[in-house]
Image (spheres, rainbow, N blue to C red):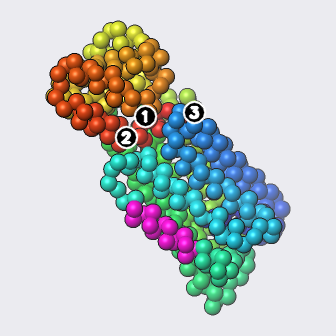
Amino acid sequence: MILVFQSHGYIYYNGMNTFFGNQMAFTIVEYLYLIYMVLQAIIAVYLGVRAIKTRIYFMLYFTIALGFFLMEAVFTELSENIPELVKAAMVMNYPIFYVIFTKKAFYKDRKSLFPLILSIILVTRVVHFIERYIFRYTVPHVGESIAQADLGIYYFHVTLVAIMHGVADLWLAYASLTAYKQSSKSCLKPWIKKRYLLVCISALVHSTFIIAWYLIPTDGSGYNSPRGLPVGILQMVTALLYSFINLLCWIMPRFFKRWLGMGEIPESIAETESLKKQIPEEVIKSLTSREIIMVVDILGDKLSDLINKDSTAAKGLLLMSILKKFGSNGMYLLDLPSLNSVFASTLKENLDKLNIPNVDEVVGMLQHELSRNQSLFMMLRI
């Protein structure tokens, strides 16, 4: 029975009567683990489908990370039938895809710590592979006694996993928290802003597993001891909390969106309605989604600065360019490729008609701004 995964952050638990010392506790743990795995699978499938459907392909990196996460559990259950080379190569790969996702979603075309963070994880991953395959280090199960002479290599292994796990989670938490702070003054719906915050919280909760790894008893008592029991409870509660936060974050039900917006909806609506009143009526008639208004509000401010025109005029020009390119169905094409094509075609034509200088440079800078805001499209469309 697996309680949590040792190979990448949790602890594989193989003991019928060790946890609380009775069959009922074992059954409870078994069901909790099943809930945890089902939630992770649901999130992975949902995000994979949505990423392809909405053409937000960088979201697939997050899906692949979850896929490796689940694969490791399967490998452990079938460990006796899987070659050591395959097991060593397939475990602990999810942090690599986590950091690639963070780079693509939050730091595309921007300077960041990505080269350093990816290098740390890759180097640590190589050492982890050598440890597992070349030196054939086998991670002891909870409840197995670790000899005093072996504690050094055991904690070395735990530290390797902690580095990869912690660095990936903490960078995602930092990136999403930064995006949340930057979005606080925009006219985005409250649930979109707070979705950034939920990503941050889920990553922080996930990172707390590191603490438990160092607290697990190594004397063979496992969780059936005054010291081990709180650690087991901490792991179980943290795993489920992470799963539910992640589920609410990515598969956000309508009632939860409304709840997140309590106390902020009137101001958000007022800002959006104000923007609607200031742009051409024929453009507004074709819109049925506030999402495009929100995106135009952000990009319109940037366009206003670039062409030295009134913000309202710039936003109206951008909306009319979308309408001209895609017609009344433009709001259903709200993604990066479609908006980039608007910038390069109809918006460029409209800017030329207004005799705006350096149009190519303006379009290029606007496309760069669009690229910088990829996480916004992710939060809107996923």
Q: Is residue 122 magenta?
A: yes
Label 3 and label 1: CA atoms lie apart by: 13 Å
The residue labelled by disc 1 is: 336
Q: Secondary structure at mark 1?
A: helix
> From what the image shows, is residue 228 above or below residue 255?
below
Q: Earlier in the sequence, mark 2 or mark 1?
A: 1
Q: Quick check: marks 2 and 1 in contact, CB under 8 Å?
A: yes
Amino acid type, label 2 = Ser
Q: Which residue occupies the foreground of this view, 21 or 347?
A: 347
Label 2 and label 1: CA atoms lie apart by: 8 Å
Image position of 33 (left or right of 116): right
**Magenta highlight range:** 115-128
Quarter assignment of residue 94: bottom right
Q: Is residue 142 visible?
A: no
Give x and y (percent) for residue 26: 79, 61
Give x and y (percent) for residue 187: 34, 29
